[in-house]
Structures are given as C-alpha cells and as structure tokens.
Image (tube, helix red, strand yellow):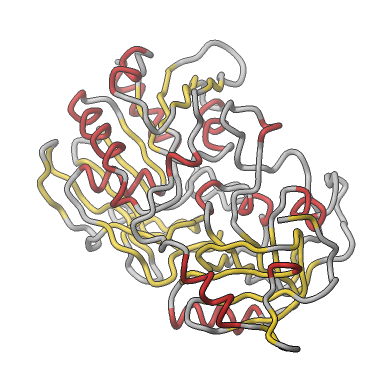
Amino acid sequence: MSGGTFGAGTAVLVLEDGRVFRGTPFGAVGQTLGEAVFSTGMTGYQETLTDPSYHRQIVVATAPQIGNTGWNHEDNESVGPTGDAADSKIWVAGFVVRDPSRRVSSWRASGSLQDELARQNVVGLAGIDTRALVRHLRTRGSMRAGVFSGDALVWKGDDLDVDALLDRVKSQPSMLGADLAGEVSTSSGYVVEPTGGDPRFTVAAIDLGIKTNTPRMFAERGIRVHVLPSSATLHDILDLKADGVFLSNGPGDPATADGAVHLTKEVLGQGLPLFGICFGNQILGRALGLNTYKMKFGHRGINIPVVEHETGRIAITAQNHGFALEGEAGQEFDTPFGRAVISHTCANDGAVEGVKLADGSAFSVQYHPEAAAGPHDASYLFDRFTRMLEGEKN
C-alpha cells in the first residue's frame, strides 16, 4: 500500500456477497482486506481508528461528514508495544466514509485525517452512499470485504473485473475463529503510575488490545497499573503482588482465547478481585462456563443503551464488539467459583452486556466504561472496582 491523494481516480469496496460500491480513494491507495463493519458514533473517529479492537476490520462511518476536527497527538487509543504514545498506530484495516471534510477546523489538530491515513498506509474509500451500505450490512450481516484503488484495481477492458477482486476478498479468513489478541498485545509490558501521590493499589492488566484511557482511569484513582502481555501467567501476576486483575478489550473470536480463559480461572481460584471490559467480559463469561457466538452485525458506536438489572440503572455506552456471551437477562447459574448472574443486557436487542460472581469478587461488562470519546455514564464502574480492592485489603 502506498500514500495517495484524496479524490484522484477510482476506489471500490467489494463485499463478500458480490455487492460493489464505487467511490474515490481516501487516505492511502492500494488494497486492504478485512471484515466490513459500521460504527454509529457521531464523534470520536480518531479513537475508533486507533482502537486495537478494530484490528482486521474495515470500518464504515454512519456519520455523513468525517474529518472536520483533523488529527491530533492526544486522542489515540493505542500506545504501542512499550506503552509509548509515540508508537501509537491506526489499527483498522480500512476506513469508508461518505463526505470527508476538506478543511480541518480544530485548534487541537496537528494535521488532517486524510494525511494521517496516507502516512500510516491505511486504504480508504470516500463518496459512497454509506446509508445504503449500512442498511445492507444490517440486513446481510458483517462480512468479508476489500477496498481497492490505484494499481490494486483489476480491469476487464474499460470496466472493473469484479470477479477477480471478489476472489481476493473471499481468499481471506473469516473473523469467526480468528485469534487476534496476541497480534495487538504489548510484547514486554509496561507500567502506568498513579496520578499524584503513592499508589494505593497495584493492578495487573492483561493486554488483549487495551485502550490508552483504561490505565489512565485507574491512575486517576491512585492505582498503579502493570500492563502485561496476553501471554502472561498467574506466576507473573503473583510476582507483582497485585491487588487485583483487569481483563482488557481486544479483537477476534473469544472462542479462540483459551489461554486467557485458563488464566482467568486461575485468578478466580486465587480469589483476586477481577474486572473485565468487552473482550474481557467474554473471557470471564467463558471462564464461568458460558458460550459465545458471532453477532449478525455487532454493536459499534457511542450511543448504545444498557440496563443494569440489579439497580434498573440505564447507561448510554460506548461499544465495539461483534461477538457476545450466550445468556438471558438476570439469568443465574452455578460455576466452580460460586453462583454467577447475567448482570447487564442491551436495551435494544437483549444481548448480554455484563456478568458477575454473586459474592462480588469478579465482574465484567461488554461495553467501554473508559469511553474515549464518551459517553461517561459508566465510568463509576472503575470506582466499583476500586472499592473491591479496598474491601479486599481491609
């Protein structure tokens, strides 16, 4: 893939079922393959693009205009393998928009979205009817796709050779069965210190695709975070004398994450307080005996309502997942670690959004309480985990 100029030439999105959308290049010019998904967030495209959970996915923005706030050095949600923000990268496989802003209008911007996509060799597509595309994906489900432009296009006379491009799309593996957490995880680990003062607690965070704002939320509560690779062992956690364990968000099929599930069972056996988010929710659920499934088109956006059944509280949440736990609202079930309950479900479709042990030693949610960029309805869950750590220490 190579850098390109906005608006020059032709670019196409080819879906696995043969549907083709023709537009213009946006970002880099070339070829990219991935699963076509859509995000309903009206803001926060930079946080979306740099979220490791979007690894190997071509993201379609439902907001009609994208790029008006440009790109900056502060809002990235990946920090690279060492924890250094300078190593941050765009994780999406490709980006599809309707109307890219031609002018950057933010005092925080260091450049344009178009230039950053080109700099990081992210192939994109602009100028298509994204409403029609999203309606298609909602009806047919998320599917394998490819974006092609420049030399990656194949012509048959004066027209595109769609069959040749479709063969490339179908040659890629499905997201079902994809084991991707190890591809986005830190290689050696790093530490995020608390904001001001000595640490009150130490948390071992298993990096399955962790976002930048998560350790920051812990740090604001006086917690030192040791971010560990996805391959971390119980011995690594015990060596840190960690007061609790966190399971992060991440990409791929949770049914493949047997290592993380095994580690979670060991942590639960030790009685350490545990908190999981997104992929971490699916890992905890699997450790408690629940199965997972691939959703038709998933939940991706920052406007998704979730019900906490114990309190009746409804939070508008940020989400990014294409897999979910099997279960029903309020369902209780026995596990080797005690009684467990489905604690949260989505108000839109009833999908499982949280699970917990009845004794209060472990809980997880499918959504993102760290929520960068917003909303912040669920940030209180970090306080809940902090109180768990306090109770354990006392």
Tell which of 40 and 61 is nearer to you: 61
Give the position of the N terminus as an image quadrant: bottom right
Looking at the rendering, which quadrant does residue 364 occupy?
A: top left
Query: In the picture provided, is 149 more to the left or to the right than 161?
Result: right
Rendering coords of residue 282 (x, y %)? 32, 49
Q: Is residue 184 above or below residue 367?
A: above
Q: Is residue 303 above or below residue 208?
A: below
Who's the residue at 28% across and 52% down the image? Answer: 255
Q: Is residue 381 visible?
A: no
Tell which of 311 and 263 is nearer to you: 263
Rendering coords of residue 380 (x, y %)? 46, 41
Q: Is residue 185 visible?
A: yes
Query: In the picture provided, is 76 more to the left or to the right than 345?
Result: right
- The count of marks equals 0
Rendering coords of residue 295 (x, y %)? 36, 67
Tell which of 193 and 377 is nearer to you: 193
Looking at the rendering, which quadrant does residue 20 occupy?
A: bottom right
Query: In the picture provided, is 65 more to the left or to the right than 382?
Result: right
Looking at the rendering, which quadrant does residue 195 occupy?
A: top right
